[in-house]
Image (spheres, helix red, strand yellow):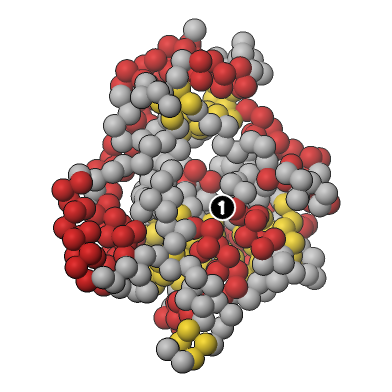
Amino acid sequence: MSRDNVFVTRPYLPPLAEVLPYLEQIWQSHQLTNSGPFHQEFEVELARYLGVDHVSLFANGTLALLTALQAERVSGEVVTTPYSFVATAHSLLWNGIKPVFVDVDPVTFNLDPSKIEAAITPQTTAILPVHVYGCPCDINAIQTIADTYGLKVIYDAAHAFAVEDDGGSILRHGDLSILSFHATKVFTTFEGGAIVSPDAKTKRRIDFLKNFGFADELTVVAPGINGKMNEIQSAIGLVQLKHVESVLLERAAIDARYRTMLNGIEGITIPVQPRSRRHNFSYFPILVDSSYPVSRDGVFDLLRSHGIFARRYFYPLISEFPMYRALPSAKASNLSEAHRLASRVICLPIYPGLADSVIHKIGELLRA
């Protein structure tokens, strides 16, 4: 892999000198996992930073999703979006749950609340929306539907770290919210994830489930799995928290430069800024319209030929993969907006340290 190549994202890594003292403490203590001191400290500090009451740390976001569905005893059918990373729907299949795909809003790219009710059946037990690119879902509309039909709401908030609406953290909505700290995310512990829960009782059940169901050394109270975050991941998280504000500011500045550079290019649509009190600028998607002289895939190939590895997030749709496409809800006619977006979208590189010269180069290529 050439050092000159530019990828859609690159994890922020804090100075090694800040990490080494944490590693030395881990080596000296010989406590590498099982809710060690850094794990406990990171849970507290992360909840404080995010402005939520209860956080349960996980080894990765997919394990957090799987456990969240178990914790809320979700079964039967779940209404969700085809416009996401495959882990969203995979977590349903792994729990023996049938995903029911619903089309998305063409402006926000999120699950369209106006389409949800038609997809609800007597077997529906929950809604699994995604805050796509960190843009908040229509929280109120989704909750109203859930309350009307007695459904759980579990948010896949993998993109929504530090995002806030007028009332505070977007993660406080629904029954649970799930975060990912994968290396491609705004905030990373290399691998990692978390569940945000509304009360101590729910957190306690989640913590049982992520540790094989152990309540104490001799007592197993639930059929749990091994989803625990280790001490090294937790230490990385504690160091990253010291830098996350500057990371968010730099992402915001890159977003603004892109908008200036790409403004007015016929056939290139820049999605509107998310209507949230605080955004995290986790992705920079553009839409390549039919009026542009090159197709979306042509733009993708053009950028790649110049060492810029943009990504077509999210293409193909989840509903097009073999394990899902036979579902009635996966029919293309049912998901017209999602298909339209998936055929047009391309996410440009955005991460701390992205050079102005790269942004300028991308702008020149797209204008040319």
Tell me residue 292's x, y (percent). Answer: 60, 14
Position of the N terminus by quadrant: top left
Q: In this view, which residue lies farthest toward the bottom?
A: 218
Identify which residue, 110 or 15, lies in the foreground. 15
Does the image show residue 47? Answer: no
Tell me residue 200's x, y (percent). Answer: 42, 81
Q: Residue at x 40, y 40 (%)?
A: 281
* Element carrying mark 1: loop
The residue that label 1 is drawn on is 130
Does the image show residue 361? Answer: yes
Please name the amino acid that badge 1 sits on. Val
115 to the left or right of 13: right
Crowd rating for badge 1 (residues with CA inside 10 Å; few <14, some 14–19, many 20+): many
Q: Residue at x 42, y 53 (%)?
A: 191
Q: Is residue 44 above or below residue 246?
A: below
Q: In this view, which residue lies farthest toward the top?
A: 368
